[in-house]
Image (cartoon, rainbow, N blue to C red):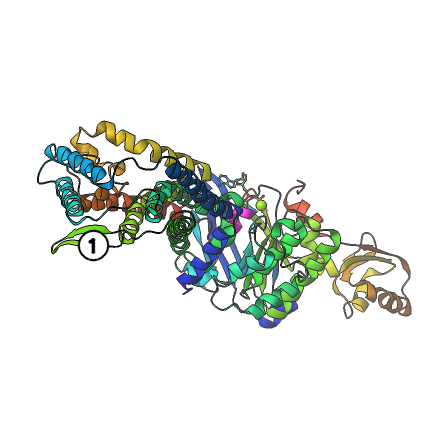
Amino acid sequence: MVKWFKLFQNEWMKLIRKKSTLVMIGLLFFAVAVMGGILKWDSMKNPSQQSWEQTVQREVAQYSKTKQAVDPSSYQYERLEEQLQTSQYRLENDLPPVQKGSFWWFVEQSQNLISFITLFSIIAAAGIVATEFSTGTIKLLAIRPVSRWKILYSKYITTIVYGFFMLGLLFLFAVVIGAVLFPVESAVALNVTDNGIIESTPLWGYLQWYLYSFVGIVLFTTLAFMISTVFRSNALAIGITMFLMFTGSQVVFLLSRYEWAKYLLFAHTDFTQYITANIMMKGLSPTFSLSILAIYFIGFHVLSYITFTKRDIAV
Amino acid sequence: MEVGKVMEHKPVVQLKGLTKTIKKKHLVRDIHLDLLPGEVFGFLGPNGAGKTTTIRMMVGLMKPSQGQVLIDGTDLHANFEKAIGEVGAIVENPELYNYLSGYKNLIHFSRMHKSVTKERIHEVIKQVGLENRIHEKVKTYSLGMRQRLGLAQALLHRPKFLILDEPTNGLDPAGIREFRHYLRKIAREEGVSIFVSSHLLSEIELMCDRVGIIQQGELIDVRNISDSVTDMQWSIDVDSPKKAKQILVDIVSDVEVNAEESSVQFNAEKDLIPEVNKKLVESGLLVYGIASRKTTLEDEFLKVTGGEQVG
Ligand SMILES: Nc1ncnc2c1ncn2[C@@H]1O[C@H](COP(=O)(O)OP(=O)(O)O)[C@@H](O)[C@H]1O
Ligand SMILES: [Mg+2]
């Protein structure tokens, strides 16, 4: 019947024309700029004392030590093994890693601001359903020749696209501000493949980091969206989701001795653990994480769907 | 009423035993009602009678506990997208997106219908008289302007059936008069069936063809009101009421003889009275007095509600 794209257009218009959205974009730019300023100042004040060879050697020592404590059949062991290989390769071929105070280094540092994007996505998801109820506009929305579930999913898709858009914006800001403040030096990233070690631009690695971070953003956004739909309350959705975002991984850390803790959502929301190989607990792998995340994801959707399509609208 | 008679169509909307029960309390109970094309139907009842609840069920915001809503023969709950496409509505206040312009609001709703063109949007804006302010944000609008914009969004897709829940809230007397004429116009010219709820008797009386009275969730009476609005009831004291009746049956309707008071009673428009008087005098009857009485809906309403005041 009515095209999905039109529903998306509507939701996007309503989201993007909110003052809070403009404020978020402004804040994001401001945050990247401030970080750029501070890091510039710091890298000029405290240039690195060690040569890059020393740094890499220190890393190698650390990886080897960690490796001994890790189960050889685990994912983590595999990744540590790879990192040792690439570090060795660097030293042998005289390929310095990305240098502190350089453009690529700043792009890498921008990863620390990704939690802002999670926060912004949560805020958008928490408001997109609940606000229609609190302002009463849901009534005019729900009496159109569009089934309720289509309205719900056009809203969901919009928040996910919004999260992706903001993430892209962060990357863009980081590249622009990085290029303005820091020297653009060429650097080489190393990847272990079946055909040995391959040299490439560091760009792919950073994009991969952003993409892996997006997994967590999607889950937190879906959680906030679900709470917003079930309780029809913006504040509750933001409050609960943020609380879980800040405490969830702590709780998993405390419980990591227990086997069942690996079924907790927050053991998996930080998907970048598979890049750093700094894995939260034993027995995790990307496929296992994705399966657990999929189960929670579907659960959140079922709850949203049922409450939104079945419940009376009496605002 | 004329249009209703001429078209004599099957009902646009049928409510069949509509009931809403929440926590064992009947908010609305067993409402049966047929609405005809081109008809303005008034849904009158005191605050809390269940008007909005009935309307929420008629537009699918609430699911009836029992009963059915048929729109143009289509069951609203079985085939929502098809049935609701024929409906335009304002439920309670016209809540729109405050931070968007009036125009953006209309664009928004038009995208949710199959074929609302830009031309149609401009046409509706003109119809409701919002041309000058349509590109301003809705938060700057007065309540009256919001009502107009609410009406505009309800009309965009040329619905066969228009539901307006207490639409004159916030309008000034001039605005109400204009609104009334406008409603009658679209009912007459476009054959739209209009369902207007109100707790104000005077309002319903002036704009509706038929009225249903709801109290404590039950539809206690449905009647035509157009006659009582245009016609007045007259009483003429004459020496021979029987003879007067024979003379008058040709010109006026519902002539009744009141032998006790030696008078005749009938319904007629005011314009006819000089003619009536002339006829009686020419026939040699002695006319002692002519009295008029407007039978308002209020009398009828007070009768059916047992004297309980509305509103
Ligand atoms: N969602 C609800 N849950 C319980 N009671 C309700 C709900 N909505 C309305 N009511 C009650 O139902 C009655 C009818 O309300 P409503 O339909 O809004 O009346 P009206 O529109 O005629 O003023 C009122 O007593 C009201 O308090
Ligand atoms: Mg009401």
In the image, taking residue A263 as reference, residue A246 lies left or right, namely right
Location of residue B216 in the rendering, given as x and y in whole percent from the top left corner: 56, 42
**Furthest-bottom residue in this view:** B6
> Which of the pair B299/B194 is nearer the observer?
B194
Question: What is the quadrant of the C terminus of chain B in the image?
Answer: top right
Disc 1 residue crowd, few under 14, some 14–19, many 20+, Cα 10 Å: few
> Which of the pair B153/A281 is nearer the observer?
A281
Location of residue B133 in the rendering, given as x and y in whole percent from the top left corner: 66, 58
Q: How many marks?
A: 1
Question: What is the quadrant of the N terminus of chain B in the image?
Answer: bottom right
Q: Residue B60 in magenta? A: yes
Residue that appears at 16% across and 38% down: A60
Span shown in magenta: B52-61
Residue flagged by tag 1: what amino acid is it?
Glu
**Furthest-left residue in this view:** A72
Magenta: main secondary structure: helix
> Which of the pair A209/A182 is nearer the observer?
A182
Residue that appears at 73% across and 51% down: B172
Element under disc 1: strand
In the image, taking residue B77 as reference, residue A253 lies left or right, namely left
Location of residue A239 in the rendering, given as x and y in whole percent from the top left corner: 41, 34
Q: Residue A253 in magenta? A: no
Q: Which residue is mark 1?
A: A199
Chain to which the residue tagged by mark 1 belongs: A
Location of residue A44 in the rendering, given as x and y in whole percent from the top left corner: 39, 39
In the image, taking residue A151 as reference, residue B253 lies left or right, namely right
In the image, taking residue B203 as reference, residue B259 lies left or right, namely right
